[in-house]
Amino acid sequence: MTSLNSQTAFVPGRLEQMSTRIAFFIAGFGIAAWAPLVPYAKARAGLDEGTLGLLLLCLGVGSILAMPLAGILATRFGCRRVTTGGTLLICAALPLLATVSSIPALIAALFMFGAGLGTVDSTVNLQAVIVERASGKNMMSGFHGLFSLGGIVGAAGVSGLLGLGISPLGATLVVIVMLLIALARAVPHLLPYGSESSGPAFAVPHGIVLFIGGMCFIVFLAEGAALDWSAVFLAQERGIDTAYAGLGYAAFALTMTAGRLTGDKIVRRLGATRVIVFGGLTAAAGL
């Protein structure tokens, strides 16, 4: 574990900012690759909507359990190691999601996939906070814009591969290669430390933290619905070819990208409160 003195002696710069952007891209790309595969998994296992919904909870459970653990591990071993481990877990789960047909196997694969996503998501946000503070600038929205950009590439890319007649397994293997290439670019400048270890490993949220957490829960609930159900909806209710149904999530990610890449400038001009209110009303209107 890196000591606090060595942490404070090192100030993250542009290379660390770039590695943070790549890591966010990895997180968005990895999760979006699942969206076009959902109708295939549903058909392969012969699932109805109710059973599929219950199975998809396993992804969320894996993420929820992994996120606090990832924070603890990042404090002890650094963002670099934990992000690498989470990415490799995503890579291990994707081929299973593309091939397994039994419910127990899908449960295990979704839990593994969710744990990998939660690990990367938690750790890269930790790194983003450290890097943003060191820069003295608003950078968080731009970082998350790379997550959404990864979502566009992942959903549209996998849909395109499926449309060309490539099997779900073949498409996921392409995704894995791209994830590993991106990881190799990011790793050298991911932070070898996490956060200061002087505080408690876990603190019960309260006050404004609890309120913000509730807001995030609602937002991610809507985002998760788009991820897990948009392809199924477009294929079953709108008659779109299953191979291209994942483009629905790509369109969703496109608008998220536009908002996030311009978000830092908008916050500086309008203020955080106005942006939150307007963004919430816009999202509610879309629902």
Image: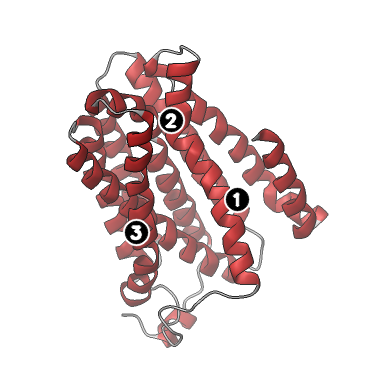
The residue singled out by tag 2 in the image is 155
Q: Please say if the residues under marks 3 and 2 sit with CB atoms less than 8 Å apart.
A: no
Q: Amino acid at mark 1?
A: Gly
Q: Is residue 228 above or below residue 210?
A: above
In the visual, does 266 lie left or right of 235?
right
Q: Along the line of sight, which residue is nearer the eye, 66 or 176? A: 66
How crowded pointer 2 is (Cα within 10 Å; few <14, some 14-19, many 20+) is rated as: many
Q: Is residue 9 above or below residue 222?
A: below
Quadrant in which the C terminus appears: top right
Q: Residue at x 32, y 41 (%)?
A: 55
Q: Amino acid at mark 2?
A: Ala
In the visual, does 275 lie left or right of 154?
right
Name the N-terminal-most of marks 1 and 3. Answer: 3
Q: Amino acid at mark 3?
A: Thr
Q: Please say if the residues under marks 2 and 1 sit with CB atoms less than 8 Å apart.
A: no
Q: Is residue 237 above or below residue 127?
A: above
Q: Which mark is residue 83?
A: 3
Residue 78's spot in the image, x, y percent? 35, 71
Instruction: Measure the C-alpha gap from mark 1 to mark 3.
Output: 19 Å
Q: Secondary structure at mark 2?
A: helix
The residue singled out by tag 1 in the image is 142
Quadrant in which the N terminus appears: bottom left
